[in-house]
Amino acid sequence: MPGNGWLSEEYIRERLLIASKLSRKFSLEDFKLLFFVPIEDERVCEIAK
């Protein structure tokens, strides 16, 4: 995952977009494990909005 804050948000947004196109639902923990997103849950939810 990129170290730059802006790139990190773009990385997560891209992974959220990919996950939304898959034909199954993910829990937040599954999403973080599957896409190697090592940030707090609240931050992922904030970016997803």
Image (cartoon, rainbow, N blue to C red):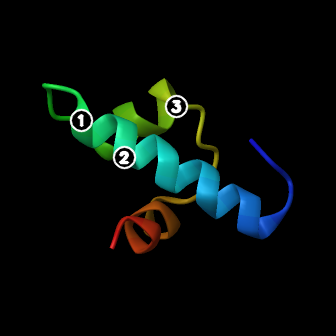
Q: Residue 1 at what x, y percent from top left?
A: 74, 41
CA neighbours of label 1 inside 10 A, class few (<14), some (14 to 19), many (20+): few
Q: Residue 47 at what x, y percent from top left?
A: 46, 69
Q: Amino acid at mark 2?
A: Leu
Q: Judging from the image, what secondary structure is the residue with disc 3 in?
A: loop
Residue 13, numbered label: none
Gap between marks 3 and 2 measured at Cα: 12 Å
Q: Residue 20 at what x, y percent from top left?
A: 25, 42
Q: Give 44 or 29, whichever is nearer the viewer.
A: 44
3 or 2: tag closer to the N-terminus: 2
Q: Give 5 or 40, whichever is nearer the viewer.
A: 5
Corner quadrant of residue 29: top left
Q: Judging from the image, what secondary structure is the residue with disc 1 in?
A: helix
Q: Quadrant of the C terminus?
A: bottom left
Pointer 1 residue? 21
Residue at the image position 62 percent from the left and 49 percent from the top: 11
Q: Amino acid at mark 3?
A: Phe
Residue 35, numbered label: 3
Looking at the image, do the residues carrying marks 1 and 2 touch, with CB atoms under 8 Å apart?
yes
CA neighbours of label 3 inside 10 A, class few (<14), some (14 to 19), many (20+): some
- Looking at the rendered image, the disc whose residue lies closer to the viewer, 3 or 2, is 2
Residue at the image position 46 percent from the left and 61 percent from the top: 44
Residue 17, numbered label: 2
